[in-house]
Image: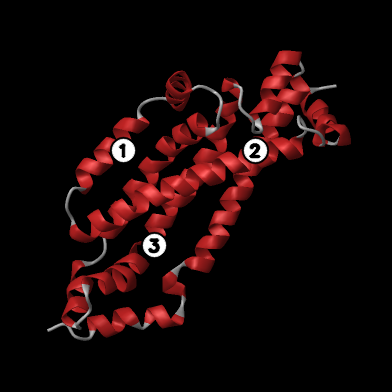
Amino acid sequence: MNAAGGAWHWLTTRAHWSGTDGVTHRLGEHLYFTGVSLGLALAIALPVALVLGHYGRGGAVAVTLAHAGRAVPTFAVLTLLLIAFGSGSDWPVIAALVLFAVPPLLTNAYVGMREVDPDVVEAARAAGMTGGQVLLRVELPLAFPLIWTGVRSATVQVVATATLAAMAGFGGLGRVITAGFARQTTAQVVAGAVLVAVLALLVEAACLALQRLLDPMRRPRRRSVLPAARSVRP
């Protein structure tokens, strides 16, 4: 039996989906690491990027520092965090994934804010909008596509990178792969890789669907804001 056929047989065997070592449990762990890490990264990166992009100050320094942190391999960061904090909790994995997710979120959000047409911003201010209203009703809707591209990129990357948690003894779909290596079972290794790839593709599709749903510029009540702001230009 070839690797593809063996992987299909492994995936279609019900016993491999149940129990603490089953795919269902490992998938839950993988989604937990992904969700918590991405949530924390969003809470850290987006407010900083939106504020810096709105005021146009300090963004280059923040982006440079974020990318400097990304230059360090995630597994190396995870190893250092394990040495510092031990393996008694999930925080070493979560912290490593947060550091990995912050750069694309911060960079895309900042660049998206800075690429908003300054004439539109000035027109909105001339119409009497406050700084907060300009940010929320003009800059953020216009920057949303690029911001969401960063969110989508970070999400897919975290889903893929969370597989490394298994190499440090933590859970997730990576445990399917490491168990396959330990047992010298090629079919299980391939099956684990397929599971991670399919999950990443499903997450990518979900992000695309959410972009169409959440994009403020697709809502009629938002479209009326920008023409009104432009109409007051001298």
Q: Position of residue 42 (x, y in %)?
A: 42, 50
The label on residue 161 is none
- The residue singled out by tag 2 in the image is 29
* Disc 3 secondary structure class: helix
Q: CA distance from mark 3 to mark 2?
A: 30 Å
- The residue singled out by tag 1 in the image is 66
* Disc 2 secondary structure class: helix
Three-letter amino acid code of the residue under disc 2? Glu
Quarter of the image for residue 224 reads bottom left
Mark nearest the camera among 1 and 3 is 1
Q: Point out the image quarter for the C terminus.
A: bottom left
First-in-chain label (3 vs 2): 2
Circle 2 packing at 10 Å, graded few (<14), some (14-19), many (20+), is: some
Q: Point out the image quarter for the N terminus.
A: top right
Q: CA distance from mark 1 to mark 2?
A: 27 Å
Circle 3 packing at 10 Å, graded few (<14), some (14-19), many (20+), is: many
Q: CA distance from mark 1 to mark 3?
A: 20 Å
The label on residue 144 is 3
Three-letter amino acid code of the residue under disc 1? Ala
Query: In the visual, does 45 lie left or right of 118?
Result: right
